[in-house]
């Protein structure tokens, strides 16, 4: 599933490519791709004729400002889920069988949404409505990793007395928004913390180090265009490059890049975890 760096990479690409993009036509090829409104014609009517403005990101959600005649016309919301991706096309091309939604400009350029697993979702939020009132998952998100609210003290308060593994805690979107399996493993390695450690056993110093490590790992991945191990591509179809420099993720059995010991892999809470038993305690 695309995590914060991949979603941020897509956001930047959409904002750069769709500057002043006016939606001339919309085709929905898979109805389940539209979460709201339930009537597909209402979703299409909300987008057609709208000019796409700034894109924002909250956790793994994307939202675009829409306008008509210079006046607010609502928002366009997107969640890529496991395999969703956008593709920008200057010239016409036949859609692949995994194409779910197609949007064209007045000039015939196309923004195509492709989703192999078909879990991705889109929303049209009418003007005057908060995005969170329609995209209800936004209401459950914790602070962004880059925000001032996400601090060692915050983590200490939230994790006090918790017996769940710290790896599982980092995957909880109510604790911190946007972190998934890849960057939980990578940040724990960078902080020297074993994924099985009970969350409540970490000291304030360790939590502050983990917070800083997470921020640095995310920033590095964003700078590399995210991670591609299977499906992720940016809107030009380009792979992310972070996977080539990952410290532990998907490196089970390979030597640790720091100490040479074999990287371990086991399942925690139903998710694969990778760590170095020598470098992480």
Image (cartoon, grey):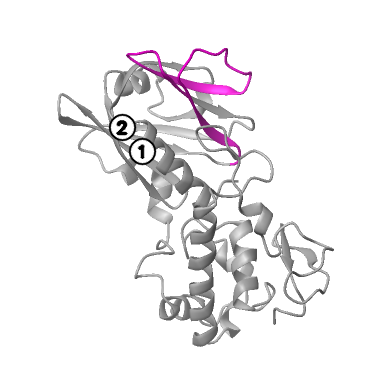
Residue range highlighted in magenta: 82-111
Position of 195 with respect to 218 (left or right) is right
Q: Secondary structure at mark 1?
A: helix
Query: In this rendering, is residue 273 above or below 259?
Result: above
| Quarter of the figure with the C terminus | bottom right
CA distance separating discs 2 and 1: 6 Å
Classed neighbour count for the residue bearing mark 1: other residues with Cα under 10 Å, few (<14), some (14–19), many (≥20)? some
Numbered mark located on residue 19 in the image: 2
Asked whether the viewer can see residue 33, the reply is yes
Residues at circles 2 and 1 in contact by the CB criterion of under 8 Å: yes
Residue 68 in the image: x percent, y percent?
A: 19, 25
x and y, in percent, of residue 194 in the image: 68, 76
Does the magenta segment cover residue 204?
Answer: no
Residue where numbered disc 1 is placed: 15
Task: Give the left or right position of residue 45, taking residue 208 as reference.
Answer: left
Numbered circles on residues, count: 2
């Amino acid at each position: 599933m695309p995590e914060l760096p991949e979603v941020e990479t897509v956001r930047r690409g959409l904002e750069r490519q769709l500057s002043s993009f006016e939606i001339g036509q919309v085709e929905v090829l898979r109805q389940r791709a539209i979460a709201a409104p339930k009537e597909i014609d209402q979703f299409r009517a909300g987008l057609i004729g709208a000019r796409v403005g700034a894109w924002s990101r909250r956790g793994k959600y994307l939202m675009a400002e829409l306008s008509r005649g210079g006046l607010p016309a609502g928002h366009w919301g997107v969640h890529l889920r496991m395999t969703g991706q956008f593709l920008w096309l200057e010239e016409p091309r036949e859609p692949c069988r995994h194409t779910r939604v197609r949007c064209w400009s007045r000039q015939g350029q196309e923004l195509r949404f492709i989703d192999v697993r078909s879990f991705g979702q889109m929303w049209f939020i009418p003007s005057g409505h908060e995005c969170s009132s329609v995209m209800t998952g936004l209401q459950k998100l914790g602070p962004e990793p880059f925000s001032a609210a996400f601090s060692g003290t915050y983590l200490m308060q939230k994790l006090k007395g918790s017996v769940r593994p710290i790896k599982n805690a980092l995957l909880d979107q109510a604790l911190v928004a946007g972190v998934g399996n890849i960057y939980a493993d990578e940040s724990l390695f960078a902080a020297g913390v074993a994924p099985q450690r009970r969350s409540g056993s970490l000291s304030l110093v360790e939590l502050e180090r983990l917070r800083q490590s997470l921020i640095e790992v995310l920033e590095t991945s964003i700078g590399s265009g995210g991670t591609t191990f299977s499906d992720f591509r940016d809107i030009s179809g380009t792979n992310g490059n972070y996977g080539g420099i990952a410290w532990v993720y998907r490196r089970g059995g390979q030597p640790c890049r720091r100490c040479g010991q074999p990287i371990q892999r086991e399942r925690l809470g139903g998710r694969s975890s990778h760590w170095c038993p020598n470098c992480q305690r």
